[in-house]
Image: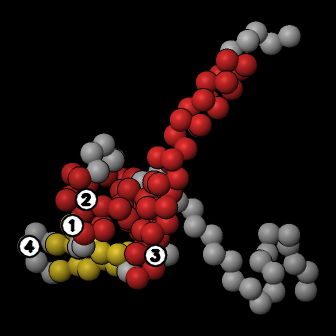
Amino acid sequence: MSTSPLDPPSGHELLVVRPSKWTLVVVVQLREGTMRFNELRRNMGGVPQKSLSQTLRELERDGFVTRTAYATIPPRVDYDLTELGRELLTLADDFHRFAQRNREAVEEARRLFDAVDARPSA
């Protein structure tokens, strides 16, 4: 039986998290507890409904978020972080501190890159 270079190594599970631009925002929003879809969307400002739906599905699939649907009229759906999601929240907080600490260095690197990139090519 042949294997493809894309196949994971035998006997190993690979964890691949493919975050959207909204992943960490959703996780941070759920920090305080259970929220409904529209509440999340309202708190996140400009997130498109489709993007939020897709992000929540991905987070649920990967075990970071639970989705609880209630058979009410109108239907009610709540989202909450799992323990795994709370661990991801820790990483989000670390990333935020990193970004705050290194903001000026990144802005300077961008300025330098853009100055070189703006020159006419030879």
* Farthest residue, direction bottom: 11
**Residue 95 percent coordinates (x, y):** 50, 57
Asked whether the residues under the numbered discs 3 and 4 touch, taking CB atoms below 8 Å apart as contact, a structural biologist would say no
What SS does tag 1 mark? strand
Mark 4: few/some/many CA within 10 Å (<14, 14-19, 20+)? few
What SS does tag 4 mark? loop
Comparing 87 with 52, the one in front is 87
User: Disc 3 to disc 4, how far (Cα)?
Assistant: 34 Å
**Residue 37 percent coordinates (x, y):** 24, 63
* Farthest residue, direction left: 73
> Which amino acid does the dot numbered 4 rest on?
Ile
Asked whether the residues under the numbered discs 1 and 2 touch, taking CB atoms below 8 Å apart as contact, a structural biologist would say yes
> Which amino acid does the dot numbered 1 rest on?
Arg
Q: Which residue is mark 1?
A: 36
Comparing 48 with 115, the one in front is 115
Answer with left or right where residue 6 lies relative to residue 91.
right
Image quadrant of residue 11? Answer: bottom right
- The answer to whether residue 53 of the structure is visible from this angle is no
Mark 1: few/some/many CA within 10 Å (<14, 14-19, 20+)? some
Q: Nearer the viewer, mark 3 or mark 4?
A: 3
* Farthest residue, direction right: 2
Residue 87: assigned label: 3
User: Disc 3 to disc 1, how far (Cα)?
Assistant: 21 Å
Residue at 80%, 13% in the rendered image: 121
Q: Which residue is mark 4?
A: 73
Residue at 10%, 77% in the rendered image: 72
Q: Which residue is mark 2?
A: 40
User: Disc 2 to disc 3, how far (Cα)?
Assistant: 20 Å
**Residue 54 percent coordinates (x, y):** 42, 60
Residue 2: assigned label: none
